[in-house]
Amino acid sequence: MNQLDALKQFTTVVADTGDFKQLAQFQPQDATTNPSLILKAVQKPEYAPLLAEAVATHRGLPLDVVMDHLLVRFGCEILKTIPGRVSTEVDARLSFDTAATVARARRIMALYEAQGIPRDRVLIKIASTWEGIQAAAELEREGIRCNLTLLFAFCQAVACGQAKVQLISPFVGRIYDWYKKSAGAAWDEAAKSGANDPGVQSVRAIFNHYKKHGIATEVMGASFRNIGQITALAGCDLLTISPELLAQLAATEAPLNQALDAAAAQAMDLPAVSYDEASFRLALNEDAMATEKLAEGIRAFCADAVKLEELMKKV
């Protein structure tokens, strides 16, 4: 059995791509997208017609409306290929505006529903800022399920659990990147791989906390740099993986064992933790890695949203 099939015994496998033509071969349950992935996809010849069609059909409407139509069009195509859910992201430029995030999420969901897609097949992706988490809490109460992304710190995960969000996407590879870069020449790749990878350790701590305290929010590890990070998280609720790494897993026959175990977590001695806005902001500020990576991630998604708008203007 290859490692991809083995992983599916313990974990729901999700494809991290806007390239829906690649999906079928890996048979993922769910799929996630973000502005960067959609930007990458629409620059490929086979997807250019989707961009042209979205712009032509909605010409004259504000660019943000056209963008949401385009994102939903990709989401609908992805849903034809997978049995589960697709994640579609709210514009990252709204990451610090709770009311605007709620309004945008409602609009995206309305566009899906207009295409006959039920709410339970869509997750609205929102950055894990304090404002984003509060928006998600409000949306969840309305029955709009959320995926909180750009999650790097334990305090972000705790706040998401308090908000009763459906799912979180703690980032593994970007945490690894930060620690590797900050260590410089002192970095020991072998010593910091697998279960000792700082990104893997972050997700494991969140998973164990949730399972210990009966928090229903799903944990979906994201942003992987190598298959060792993925196999070290076998047993996580979900893992969202790029097509390149899915292909590597499918081509690898080495044995794969469950690494995370909800039952084992319940027996651990882990204190309950909660945050209000002030303590959340302080905890996030105390974590240099999470502070820098959250800001950097939002900047990158904002930049790609702008690039996507520029492409629309040229169609």
Image: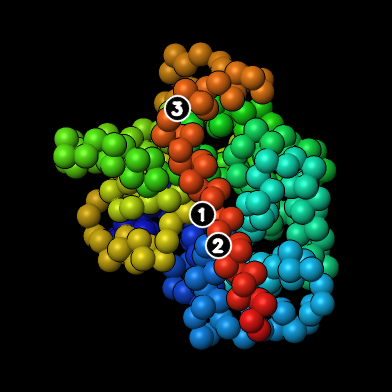
Residue at label 2?
304
Q: Is residue 102 found left or right of 90 in the rendered image?
A: right
Q: Is residue 61 visible?
A: yes
Amino acid under label 3?
Answer: Asp
Mark 1 sits on what residue? 300
Labels 3 and 2: the sequence-earlier one: 3
Residue 266, compared with residue 219, is above or below; it is above
Left or right: 203 with respect to 195?
right
For disc 3, the neighbor class at 10 Å (few under 14, some 14 to 19, many from 20) is some
Dot 2: what SS? helix
Tell me if label 3 and label 2 are in contact, CB under 8 Å.
no
SS under mark 3: loop
- Give the residue at x 62% y 28%: 159
Does the image show residue 232?
A: no
**Where the N terminus falls, by quadrant?**
bottom left
Name which quarter of the figure residue 70 lies in. bottom right
Identify the residue at horizontal 49%, vertical 34% (top origin). 291
Image coordinates of residue 42 in percent, x first then y, are 55, 76
**Callout 1–callout 2 Cβ contact below 8 Å:** yes
The residue singled out by tag 3 in the image is 287
> Number of labelled discs?
3
* Residue nearer the viewer, 309 or 65: 309
